[in-house]
Image (cartoon, rainbow, N blue to C red):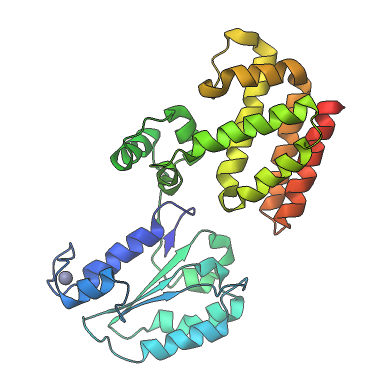
Amino acid sequence: MFCGPEGIGRKTMAECFAGALLCSSGGVVPCGQCQGCVLLKSGTNPDVIHIRKQEGKASVGVEEVRLVQEEISTAPQFGKYKVLIFENAEKMTVQAQNALLKTLEEPPPYIVMILISSNNSQILDTVKSRSVKVDFKRYTNSEIMEAYKRKSSESTDSRLLCEYADGIIGRALSMAGSDEYGKICDRIVDGLKELSGGSGRALCNFQNLFAEYSEKKELFFFTLYSILRDISVAAAYGRKTALQNAQTEDKIYAISDCVGYHKALKCLEQVNKAWRMAGQNVNYKLMADALSIRIQEVFYG
Ligand SMILES: [Zn+2]
C-alpha cells in the first residue's frame, strides 16, 4: 500500500516497480528493450492492470473488483508477474474492499497488487492488516528546488514555489516549463484592481477568471491567497516591505492603498472559507461566483 498525498509520486513509483517486475532482463532497472518493457512504454502491456474510478462515479465498486478477480485467475501473458495498480484505493466502497480481502490474503504467486491511497482512514483495517504500508514522505524544499531545476531552465521565485509545493513534488513540477504562475498572478492582480476600482464589468470578469482556471483550482486559489496576503502586508507595513509577488509590486501597492489592511484580511478569510468548501463536493461555479461577490462587498463595505 503506497500512502501519501496526491502528487507525491506514488503512481510513478508503482509504474516503475511494475516495470522492474515485468522486464525479462531480470535487472532492478527495466532494460527498455524486451517485449514487456516495450509494451509497458506504449501503455499496452496486458500484464499491468489499472483499477481506477470510472468517469462520473464517486467510488470504485464491487463490479470493478469482480473484473479484477477474473484477471487474477489467468496467468501473465509475457512476464512472470501480473501487476494490479489500484489508483484510488481509498475510493473503494466497503463492499468492494471486502470483496478484495480473500485475494489480498492468498493471491496467486504471479500477482502483485499495489494499493495507492491518499486517505488511509477510508481503508478497512482488514485490508490494511493484509498489506505492507509504504509511506511517501514530503520532500524538503531543497529537493523540491532541485527537481524543479532539472525539469525547467526558467528561474522562479523559489520561496513561492516551495510554499505552493508544500513538499509535494508533483505540484512543483506542474509549474515547471510554463509561465502559468506569472500569468495567473498578473490576471488576478488586474482583476482585483478592477474590483477595487469599481468598474461595472469587474465582478463578471473576476467570476470568469475563476471559471477559466477551474482546471487549476489549487494553483489559482494559492495565488489569489498569496496576492491578498501581499496586499494586507503592503497595507500594514507600507512601501518598504519586500513582497512575494515582486513583479506586480506597483499594482499591489495601488490596490492596498485603496482597500487597506482590514479589508484585505477579511478577503483572506473568505478565500480560506471558500477553499475549504471546495474540498467538500460543492458546486465550484456557485462557490466561485459567491466568493467574487463577497470580495467585492468587502472592498466596498
Ligand atoms: Zn525489459
Seen at 57% across and 53% down, the residue is: 215
Residue 255 in picture, x, y percent from top left: 70, 21
Seen at 60% across and 75% down, the residue is: 93
Check the image and report above or below for 238 versus 88.
above
Indicate left or right for 254 with 122 as reference: right
Residue 160 in picture, x, y percent from top left: 49, 31
Q: Ligand 1 is found in which quarter of the picture? A: bottom left
Seen at 70% across and 27% down, the residue is: 193
Residue 275 in picture, x, y percent from top left: 68, 45
Residue toward you, 119 or 174: 174
- Locate the N terminus by quadrant: bottom left
Residue toward you, 107 or 50: 50
* Quadrant housing residue 224: top right
Confirm whether residue 244 shows in the render.
no
Residue toward you, 56 or 108: 56
Residue 128 in picture, x, y percent from top left: 48, 68
Indicate left or right for 148 with 93 as reference: left
Indicate left or right for 253 with 38 as reference: right
